[in-house]
Image (cartoon, rainbow, N blue to C red):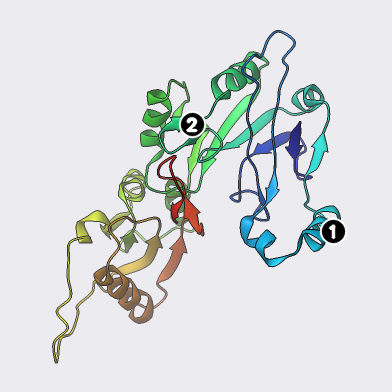
Amino acid sequence: MLMTSSICRRSCVVGGALIVPSLNYRFLANKHISSTTQLSFLSSRWSSSRSRRNSSSSSSKMESSHPGAAQPLLNPNELIDSVETFIFDCDGVIWKGDSLIDGVPQTLDMLRSKGKRLVFVTNNSTKSRKQYGKKFETLGLTVSEEEIFASSFAAAAYLNSIDFPKDKKVYVVGEDGILKELQLAGIQYLGGPDDGGKNIELKPGYLMEHDESVGAVVVGFDRYFNYYKIQYATLCIRENPGCLFIATNRDAVTHLTDAQEWAG
């Protein structure tokens, strides 16, 4: 059974909160896909934060009355034939940590054989599109860079779309993926992993300097997060006129490994 949201028209979204914040999708494809294209897509549950705030009865009522609530689709082939593009989330849909989810290769091969366009989206900004392409390859999947849309790429594309001044810089609280996409977009940047080892001397009279040419602060998932970065970003936003604040994602948790959830 495929659970699909009401926003599907000529496209179908298979994924999580990046597209439909109130829903958290998961899917599994039947391992025995044959010429009859038998599919088994599972679940779609309300986000855990929402379900914790509501009793089972009120949650059930909300699911049935919410305009964006997913409806069960009893005939997967009907959906497949009715849309041209399938949009997949990556973390928790294509893979979990470094493990490929069962049934994914067969499902993607089947959709490609039918001439469907596939798009892979992720709000994980730690990698660039090129780096995600390598991850797909490592997992045995052939995906072109043009089929991948990561939030690291989206941040750089957004800055270009608003004609971000060439003489301005971006301060990055995040990882290599953001830096690589900014570089490809021709945008100056500083920060990132290089600031992970920097400390602040909290002593009387200490004044932290910052680059006054920073015109935007981009924040994403950062395993090297520290107080230096917090203060530097704060100074840029507070003291540089017109400095933008751009967040690549709002995830409370992420799936760095398949053993547990990690802070997002």
Which quarter of the rendered picture does the N terminus lie within? top right
State how far apart marks 1 and 2 are (Cα).
41 Å
Label 1 element class:
helix
Image point (37%, 80%), residue name:
238
Task: Say whether residue 160 is visible.
Answer: no
Q: Which of marks 1 and 2 is in front?
A: 1
Q: x, y percentage for residue 130?
A: 37, 34
Which image quarter holds the C terminus? bottom left
Q: Which amino acid does label 1 sit on?
A: Lys
**Left or right: where 186 falls relative to 82:** left
Q: Which residue is drawn at 59% across and 28% down?
A: 118
Q: Residue 89 carries which label?
A: none
Q: Position of residue 41 (x, y in %)?
A: 69, 30
Quadrant of residue 106 within the rendered picture: top right
- Left or right of 181, for residue 43: right
Disc 1 marks which residue?
61
Q: What element carries label 2?
A: helix
Residue 159 visible in the picture: yes
Q: In this figure, which residue is indicated by the disc labeled 2?
A: 146
Q: Which of 125 and 91 is in front in this view?
A: 91
Looking at the image, tell me whether mark 1 or mark 2 is earlier in sequence order: 1
Between 201 and 173, the residue placed more toward the observer is 201
Local crowd at mark 2 within 10 Å, few (<14), some, or many (≥20)? few
**Does residue 106 appear left or right of residue 91 in this picture?**
right
Taking the view exactly as shown, the residue that stands out farthest to the bottom is 204
Q: Which residue is drawn at 38% across and 75% down?
A: 237
Seen in the picture, residue 148 relative to 69 is either above or below; the reply is above
Q: Which amino acid does label 2 sit on?
A: Glu
